[in-house]
Amino acid sequence: MSQAMSQGTKPKHTLSGEEIIRCTGVNKWYGEFHVLKNVNLSVQKGERIVVCGPSGSGKSTMIRCLNRLEEHQKGTIVIDGIELTNNLKNIELVRREVGMVFQHFNLFPHLTVLENCTLAPIWVRKMPKAEAEERAMSYLKRVRIAEQAKKYPGQLSGGQQQRVAIARSLCMSPKVMLFDEPTSALDPEMVKEVLDVMIGLAEDGMTMLCVTHEMGFAKSVADRVIFMDRGEIVEQDTPDAFFSNPKSERTRLFLSQILNH
Amino acid sequence: MTDNVQSVGLPDERPPANTVGPIAWLRNNLFNSWYNAILTILVLGLLASAIPPFLNWLLFRAHGFDATSTVCRQDAGGACWGFISEKLRFIMFGMFPWEQQWRPLVTIAVFIALLVASCDRRFWKPWFGLVWAAGLALVAVLMWGGVFGLTYVENTLWGGLPLTIILSVIGLAVAFPVSILLALGRRSNMPAVKVLCVTYIELIRGVPLISLLFMASVMLPLFLPNGVSIDKLLRAQIAFIMFAAAYMAEAIRGGLQAIPKGQYEAADGLGLGYWQKMRKIILPQALAIAIPPLVNTFISFFKDTSLVIIIGLYDLLGTAKAALSDPSWRGFYREAYLFIGVIYWIFCFSMSKYSQKLERDLNRGHRR
Ligand SMILES: Nc1ncnc2c1ncn2[C@@H]1O[C@H](COP(=O)(O)OP(=O)(O)O)[C@@H](O)[C@H]1O
Ligand SMILES: [Mg+2]
């Protein structure tokens, strides 16, 4: 995959230093199973983070806690100054500002591509329909799928559906975008079209957390790579340091498995 | 590998001759094995022996619409359609005052117009609810009267087709939103709501409709304070609504269960509230899936309105039975039941056909 990426031309950008996500001592259990163990994470505005780790290590669970699709049981999660608690109002406020892209797209099959994109702005942000459609079209253009706006998701390929899903999230003007293995369900020839859209987003300064196994993407785009194993953040570093000089044995093992298959 | 590369496409060929045409169809569908051939011949024989006598009775030896019962009784080998023309207005409108029967006739027309218009998805807008409200108000004025110079007609005199339509259409229209709430409640995270809905649904489903109607007509008055009485028709209507809501709730629950978790998560992730999520994302998909079982409920419910006969209301079946109790027309039950059977069938078959069309329309464009 890494050939697809233009290595070495990583866009320069400076971080504001402003913190947008802060997780402190986050723990979560599924019944008896301790799935997140004391996760501490701080993300700055504009930062691009890639999360990797073996399957079942809790990557999805961690990023799903960030918009409360999963509930954590201990510790605090603060997103853009709002703490995630049982307060429904706060949860809805956070979800407005945090976009999420799923492995299986989860587009609404009974709505057209355009309607998928305008639904939340109209109903959640109370935006006038005409304005919502105009913005949706501009985002659909940006993910290069504007000509399919009147089609239904079922008529599109996987790569096209995932680009629509990204546009749908962007229409809410989120401050943070979460990606949970956005290319894992795609046929190989469609991975690049989705990664290209994500690279474009990164270049525009979007704050991103991506769970992905696309190491080429991590090398060329990420500011920081986080490695998780068995519910813990084992290591986090810049991509250069992470790939050339991993500190922990677990990371080395993971990298050797994923890079030499 | 060069053998496998074709530079020119192969030309299209016609299918082999023995796989197309009527002869091939017969061979493939009716005579494709010895036991299928035997079955085909048996069925054909059965039809040949049953259809001619039936047609004889129905048409060739039948007495026309002007026949009197005396004429019919002399030659009993054919149907007596004179019975239908003689009793038509009674079967259709029951005991509604004779010279006022244009009112239930217009009522039927209003309902049919509303139902036909409702089939068009372009009218599925909030304002169409107002059209329905206006239509129902018009029906109330027509049936009860007492205003605009119309004489007052007590609802104990209502009967026949208008009564069947009123009970089923209003019953279903009220039960439908209730059933959606019940289905959502049954899947709710709130234990109290959930227990309440499950108890209600299971209680109602475990009881025959007849006993519910009896309870509504006999037991309900016992619980009411002295002097307060609820009208018999209203009591039956409430029993129907309670009954239909429980069954429809289960049909809708089936649809809800078929919606993947990802749809809920995507809606949550966009910041939609619970009711927005249900109304815009979950219910449109769940109801589309639930159309076949829902229509099944509609159809059986439409026919079940005939049970009101046991509490002394005269719906279509009731008036037909009452018509047969006229001494001079006693015994012509074949004609009576065939006639109302055809009316029931027209309504139920239209519902079934429409639901198939709706399913096709809703699935067009998007496959899941
Ligand atoms: N709803 C759930 N109930 C119980 N266990 C779960 C649930 N979801 C995930 N798990 C378990 O939690 C662990 C972490 O899952 P996940 O976060 O999906 O891992 P990853 O995304 O890193 O592959 C896995 O062992 C998985 O089996
Ligand atoms: Mg995962």
Image (tube, coloured by chain):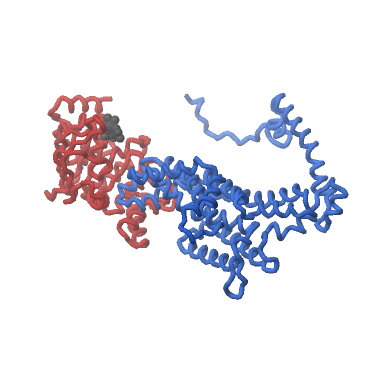
Chain colours: A red, B blue
In the rendered image, residue A15, in percent from the top left (x then y), is placed at 14, 48
Q: Nearer the viewer, residue A79 or B335?
A: B335
Viewer-nearest residue: A22 or A254: A22
Which residue is at the far bottom? B149
Foreground pick, A56 / A163:
A56
Quadrant in which ligand 2 is drawn: top left
Q: Which image quadrant for residue A1?
A: top left
Q: Is residue B293 left or right of residue A202?
A: right
In this orientation, does residue B229 appear?
Answer: yes
Number of marks in picture: 0
Q: Is residue A213 visible?
A: no
Q: Position of residue A177 (x, y in %)?
A: 25, 46
Q: Quadrant of residue A225?
A: top left
In the picture, the quarter occupied by the C terminus of chain B is top left
Could you tell me residue A87's position as x and y percent? 23, 49
Q: Nearer the viewer, residue A87 or B196?
A: B196
Q: Position of residue B28 (x, y in %)?
A: 68, 31
Residue most toward the front?
A: B226
Q: Is B203 left, or right, of B64 in this rendering?
A: left
Query: In the rendered image of this protein, does residue B149 appear above or below residue A177?
Result: below
Farthest-out residue, right:
B74
Q: Residue at x 57, y 65 (%)?
A: B139
Residue drawn at 20 percent across, 24 percent down: A253
